[in-house]
Structures are given as C-alpha cells and as structure tokens.
Image: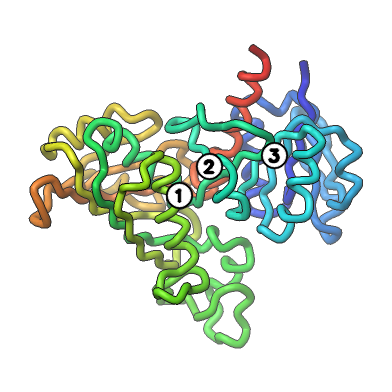
C-alpha cells in the first residue's frame, strides 16, 4: 500500500538531498508531498516521472493525513508543526535538534530498535558520521573516553553559509560570524557558561544517548572549515577492554556501511567522499595516552549520512516495520 509522505523544507540543501534519497531508496513510488516557505511555493521536482509542486507550509498540512513527514527544517519550524502532526498519527522524522532530549535519536545501523512513538530524531551530522565508526568498537570493547575534533563543511550551516564562502567583508556575511575565505572558524554555535558550543554539546549528549551508555566520557571541539560538503572528524578514544590496533581495524572492517581505507589518504578527503553513502575511516593509531587509547580519522558526507540519507533510511525501516 502506498504511503503518504511529506518532505517539509523541501527546497533547502537538506530537503533537496532528501528528495534524491527517496529516489535512491526506491520510496518515490509513494505519494510524495512537498512543503516549504512562501518564497518557494510553485517550484517543482520530478519524482517518479511526475511533477510535484512545492506547497506553502502552513496549518493546512494537517489536512493531508500524512503517514510520514520528514522535517528538514530548523527548530523554529519543527516546534510549530511536528507535534501537531504527530498527535494526528503522522510519524515525524525530525532533522532539527529540538526533540533529541525527549525522543529517540536514531542511526539505523546502530539503534533502529529504539525507534518508537510518533517522533523520531535524526542525529547531529557529525555525531552520525562519527558513531558509524565508533559503534562497533563500543559493542566489542566498550568506550571509556571519546574526544572529537571536527572539521565541518559550510553546507552544514545551510545555503547562506555557502554564499559567504568568497565574501571578504564581515559586514556583508549572511550566515557566518567571520569571513571563512582562506580561514576557519574555531567554534560552531552559541556557547554555554562552561565554554562549550551548542554543536559540541550536541555531540557529547547524543554519543551517550545513541550508544545507550551514560558513563562514556565525551569531549568535543567543533570547527567550521572552508569546504563545501563533507565533515571530517579526528577521534581519540579509550576502550574499557584490552584492545590492539588490529582489533580496532577489524571492528571497523566489520562495521555496516563503513569503508576502512587504512592509510590511503586519497580516500580520506572530502573531495573523494562527497556523495558517497558510506563513512570512510583510516589513520588508525595506537597512542601513548594510555593502555587502550587510539586515534582515527573519519570522513562522511554531511548532507547524506549526516542528514538526508540517515533520515530516509529511518523512513525505509519504519515502512518495512509497518508492512509486517
């Protein structure tokens, strides 16, 4: 039976990629509805050989009796519409961070069994990419400590940040706080009183919740870099059980949708990983910081596994579940 599926925020970077993912995961033969702000009304997308017109997002969305809605929107939009639809029986997959403390945060390869209720959350983009590499390590050896250093692309901040890429005047920036041309910005998001940014706190909280282990000690430093697409993350970690470098590499080789590339540096670059569905991992090292301490480098497409692909994977699994 066909499902009634909405993409909310259909004309943004993530929304457009989500429409692509619906095609890739062969879900575009369902009844697809597209919603966006008033400025985007009338735009159209070719979905399963049909022209689908973008409609204005307003309270009328409740009339469509949707089975699923993917919210590729900021928190402010999800706050208005997500719970309203969920209360009507629509299963909402929310890409914003608004509901992550109260509802399941899902990476299908890791914790799909936790997807319950009518609101399911996509993780932060860097969390999703990082945990694809770390989850099997945690399963086999237990993670005691994790320290992230991220190098996050401009597309993670949206279309406006990409427009800032070549701007050299701070007064003319549309999204970023500082000029990114020939530069990087050493934080992402607002700060709490301890000095951690919102992006960093997302990674800290979500790592523990998705891996279902509050005892993992996590720290993060998140940095915006002048790259269009793909987030790169340097990860230092300590395992609870004894492990060797070979053990860690084997755990990565056996992880689902993870490509272990060793020291093939040509495959650990955003320019290579862009638009790849898998997460790429290499540069695994045993460090001197402790008995079971290691480092590795991870790269993933933030518009795919960091956002749209992950959300559509959740959708595909939920549809399978409903059809059983």
Q: Nearer the viewer, residue 251 or 215?
A: 215
Q: Nearer the viewer, residue 150 or 119?
A: 119
Residue carrying label 1: 206
Image position, residue 252 (x, y; %) = 27, 34
Q: Quadrant of the C terminus?
A: top right
Residue at left 89%, top 50%?
Answer: 59
Residue at left 24%, top 53%?
Answer: 236
Residue carrying label 3: 92
- Numbered circles on residues, count: 3
Q: Residue furthest top?
A: 324
Tell me if mark 3 has few (under 14), some (14-19) or many (20+) residues whose alpha carbon lies within 10 angstroms of its own: many
Measure the C-alpha gap from mark 1 to mark 3: 19 Å
- Quick check: marks 3 and 2 in contact, CB under 8 Å? no
- Quick check: marks 1 and 2 in contact, CB under 8 Å? yes
Measure the C-alpha gap from mark 1 to mark 2: 8 Å
Measure the C-alpha gap from mark 3 to mark 2: 12 Å
Q: Secondary structure at mark 3?
A: strand
Residue at left 35%, top 52%?
Answer: 269
Image position, residue 174 (x, y; %) = 63, 75
Q: Is residue 95 above or below residue 162?
A: above
Tell me if mark 2 has few (under 14), some (14-19) or many (20+) residues whose alpha carbon lies within 10 angstroms of its own: many
Q: Secondary structure at mark 1?
A: helix
Mark with earlier residue (3, 2): 3
Q: Nearer the viewer, residue 88 or 307?
A: 88
- Quick check: marks 1 and 3 in contact, CB under 8 Å? no
From the viewer's perspective, tell me whether residue 174 is left or right of residue 51: left
Residue carrying label 2: 105
Residue at left 62%, top 55%?
Answer: 98
Image position, residue 28 (x, y; %) = 71, 28
């Amino acid at each position: 039976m066909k499902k009634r599926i909405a993409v909310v925020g259909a004309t943004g970077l993530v929304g457009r990629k989500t429409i692509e993912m619906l095609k890739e995961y062969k879900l575009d033969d369902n009844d697809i509805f597209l919603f966006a702000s008033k400025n985007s009304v009338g735009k159209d997308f070719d979905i399963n050989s049909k022209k689908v017109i973008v409609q204005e997002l307003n309270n009328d969305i409740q009339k469509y009796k949707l089975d699923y809605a993917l919210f590729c929107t900021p928190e402010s939009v999800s706050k208005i519409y997500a719970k309203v639809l969920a209360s009507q029986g629509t299963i909402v997959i929310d890409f914003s961070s608004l509901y992550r403390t109260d509802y399941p945060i899902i990476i299908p390869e890791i914790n799909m069994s936790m997807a319950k209720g009518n609101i399911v959350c996509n993780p932060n983009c860097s969390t999703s990419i990082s945990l694809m590499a770390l989850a099997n390590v945690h399963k086999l050896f237990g993670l005691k400590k994790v320290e992230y250093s991220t190098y996050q692309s401009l597309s993670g901040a949206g279309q406006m940040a990409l427009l800032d890429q070549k701007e050299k005047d701070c007064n003319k920036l549309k999204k970023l706080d500082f000029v990114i041309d020939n530069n990087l910005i050493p934080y992402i998001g607002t700060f709490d009183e301890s000095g951690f940014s919102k992006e960093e706190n997302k990674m800290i909280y979500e790592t523990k919740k998705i891996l279902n282990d509050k005892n993992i000690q996590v720290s993060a430093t998140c940095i915006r870099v002048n790259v269009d697409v793909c987030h790169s993350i340097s990860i230092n970690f300590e395992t609870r059980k004894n492990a060797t470098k070979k053990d860690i590499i084997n755990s990565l080789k056996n992880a689902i949708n993870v490509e272990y590339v060793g020291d093939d540096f040509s495959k650990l670059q955003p320019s290579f990983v862009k638009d790849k569905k898998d997460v790429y991992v290499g540069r695994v090292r045993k460090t001197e910081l402790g008995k079971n301490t290691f480092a590795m480098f991870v790269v993933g497409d933030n518009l795919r596994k960091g956002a749209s692909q992950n959300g559509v994977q959740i959708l595909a699994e939920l549809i399978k579940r409903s059809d059983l």
